[in-house]
Amino acid sequence: EEEEAAAAEAEAEEEEGGRGARDKAQERRHAQQAELAEAEVICAQLITAGGDMLARLPPLSGILIDEVAQSAESVALVALVGRGCSRAVLAGDHCQLPCTVQSQEAMARGLGVSVYERLGGPGGGAPNTPIG
């Protein structure tokens, strides 16, 4: 009986410690959210801009995408559409590295197109080029 009581007590202490860690993590997330909500400018990678951390914030009024010739269209759309941007600034140099997609299946399905390519390449294309 003593062994069972000791095991139950150890389990309860472990569970309590887990709750403490979860509480601390939740406090940290709330603090991060509060800090981001106050920010005028947020710098993030494209996929992060459309991710969970920023999803709890109001829509972004604008987004600047650098290296647009390297940015996969599908990833840029996560940030642009997922964050409800009303304005976008696209910057990049078509002479730099091309869009990189490691999955052959993704390439075969057309996901290797950069934002720059979609918009028409050098000299620009029609600004309202349909996507998809």
Image (tube, rainbow, N blue to C red):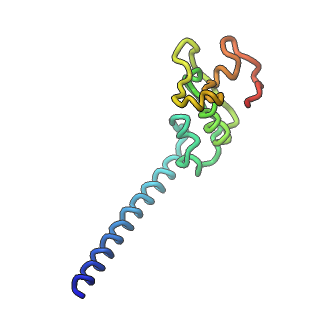
| Quarter holding residue 66 | top right
- Which of the pair 36/119 is nearer the observer? 119
The answer to whether 106 appears left or right of 28 in the picture is: right
User: Image height check: is 31 above or below 14?
Assistant: above
| Quarter holding residue 82 | top right
x and y percent of residue 44 in the render?
51, 36
| Quarter holding residue 95 | top right
Most distant residue in the left direction: 2
The answer to whether 90 appears left or right of 27 in the picture is: right
The answer to whether 30 appears left or right of 112 in the picture is: left
x and y percent of residue 110 in the render?
65, 28
x and y percent of residue 23 in the render?
41, 64
User: Image height check: is 131 above or below 53?
Assistant: above
x and y percent of residue 74 in the render?
63, 33
Identify which residue is drawn at 55% across, 19% down: 98
Identify which residue is drawn at 33% across, 76% down: 12
- Which of the pair 110/121 is nearer the observer? 110
The answer to whether 112 appears left or right of 1 in the picture is: right
Q: Quadrant of the C terminus?
A: top right
- Which of the pair 1/13 is nearer the observer? 1
- Which of the pair 123/109 is nearer the observer? 109
Q: Quadrant of the N terminus?
A: bottom left
User: Image height check: is 117 above or below 53?
Assistant: above
Number of marks drawn:
0
Identify which residue is drawn at 27% across, 83% down: 4
Identify which residue is drawn at 55% across, 49% down: 52
